[in-house]
Image: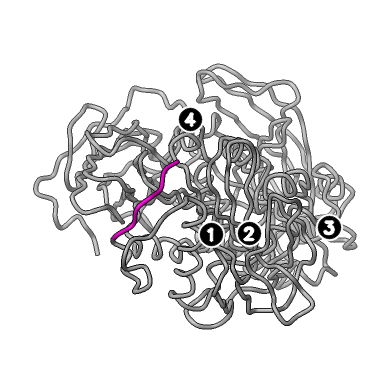
Amino acid sequence: MKRLLVVLAVLLVPAAALAQLTAYPKTSLAEDFTATWCGYCPDAYAGLEVVHSNYDYSEFLSARFYATSGDYGTTETDARMGYYGFSSYPSVVINGTERFVGVGPTTASGAPYMAAVAGAYLDPSPIQIAIDSFSIATGAISVTVTMHSPTDSLVTGDSIVFLILEDNLTAEHTRAVRDVLITGITLSGQGNTAVFNENLDLTYVGNPAQCHALVFVQRQDQEVVQATSTYPIPTYKARATVPFSPMQMGPSTGTYVGELFPIVNVGLADTFSINLVVDEAPAGWVLTYSDEAGTTYTGPTNFSLGTGEFAQWRANITPTTGGYARYHFEVDSPNLASPLVVNFRYITDNVEVLVVDDDGGESFESYFTAALRGAGRSYGVWDLASAKLTTEALQAYHLLVWNVGWSFPSLDAEDRAFLIQYLDDGNKLFITGQDVGWDLADPASDNTDLPFYHNYLHADYIIDDTNVLTLYGVAGDPVGDGLVLSISGGDGANNQDYPSEISAYDSNATGILDYNGTTYEFGAIRAVHGAAGARIVYLAFGFEAINNPTARGGLMLASWKWLLDVMFADGFETGDLSAWSSAVP
């Protein structure tokens, strides 16, 4: 339903017609390394097609590099795979840096790829690429790269890459790379341009009518900073760039005034409506928004933009309690195929628990937030796909509930570096996810970090898949005692293909849940870490799969009690959690 119906008065906000853009909306690129004989690769094809169904060609592009596949591959496509160091199929890299090797149960649904593309959707790019002309008859292509950033630059070692893609080789094989041409690019100074006139090789082109050009710029650290193509794009289009983290932190009193961000018209001239929509917020919180002139709005307003023009906006948040808000700006016009949605979150710096949403685009965090609401605890949810955890988060939040789900990498190098400091500082961690052990400790993984797994999670990885879906609490253990958990069926996620066996790595850790009656031992441990007394509860399966809320609540409450030395007043056995108290050393 159009929210334009609630406009009290039509206000036309002037655009920044004379100001220069300092960044351009980014088009994400997926490079899919595959082979015609690869039995798992169709899952990657399907997943990337899901992304294409959700984004147009001005927002997302993909290219398939076929290796050892006869006429579908070339020496150049093989070389591109070697550039990234891939040795197995499928291997997908998004924007040059986010890697997905192999497939999982959600690959065909597109969930892991969607999360990566969504996370980069608002990223500002310092450059804009325009394909001025392309002839499939001769292979001649002309491209202009414009630098919008006044401070960034492209330097020696950076590259511009030209591809020819051929669609519909068969019903299954499409977007196949038929030629690759790479040359250097250097560019600096806002408004300056670099022009390229190249000739692509048509040797491997089968049907010219099915061919398109794709061009992208890649830094020497492999980051793809911008991409474009000759695929059709919408005539009318609005985009946004957010040059700051969409995960915002601040106090629970006063008014938080957000940073300005631009809405950019990348299509024909149009008049847009904009509104701030609150998705979730504690009762009593007030959210408004302002334009760059300082005018504040509580409902929709209109603004007009010519091609390449932009208008800037910010949120104003007045909280009344600790907690968090999810909200978005929604930009629309009758000419747009769908509204532009720009998502943000604001988390007060005094919430008791921070849930880290790291499940690769799934919604498993709802299992954790339901338990927190039931317990009357204040919480925030940090979307790791939108932004990495910050130093401010490390200092503010002393209990993390880290929801890995079944995503890869489970904890990447930046996540691990954060947790090393977090745990060394004496904080508390509840972490759960199937294949965390495989990802960090199995030689077949490309993300192994045994020192972290052993010395910070204090776990030893025994086996990837027990194929056992019932766990029993260790008698007398402060967390596990009395628990019986089924991780299939019920109202759980029912997603446990690889519940793992782990054990305590050292004397700082002990098992809390075991696969009693089987040859396997522990599925969860707890540990005390370091001189500062950090505490960890680590589940080698997904908490989201526990098949009823009572069991989930029992495990979570027992874990919290141990992690935080929480003492329960009257009512714990009845489920009345209103009378919690905390014993502070």
What is the x, y in percent for residue 269? 33, 41
Instruction: Check residue 23 in the rendering and tell me which mark sits there, or answer none.
Output: 4
- Crowding near the residue tagged with mark 2, few <14, some 14–19, many ≥20 C-alpha atoms within 10 Å: many
What is the x, y in percent for residue 433? 62, 62
Nearer to us: label 1 or label 2: 2
Residue stretch rendered in magenta on the structure: 579-585
Does label 1 or label 3 sit earlier along the sequence?
1
Residue topped by disc 3: 444
Where is 153 relative to 32, above or below? above
- Crowding near the residue tagged with mark 4, few <14, some 14–19, many ≥20 C-alpha atoms within 10 Å: many
Q: State the CA–CA distance, disc 1 to disc 3.
A: 24 Å
- Crowding near the residue tagged with mark 1, few <14, some 14–19, many ≥20 C-alpha atoms within 10 Å: many
**Secondary structure of residue under mark 4:** loop
Residue farthest toward the left in the current orientation of the protein = 8
Contact between labelled residues 3 and 4, with CB atoms less than 8 Å apart: no
Task: Name the one closer to the observer, 519 or 280.
Answer: 519
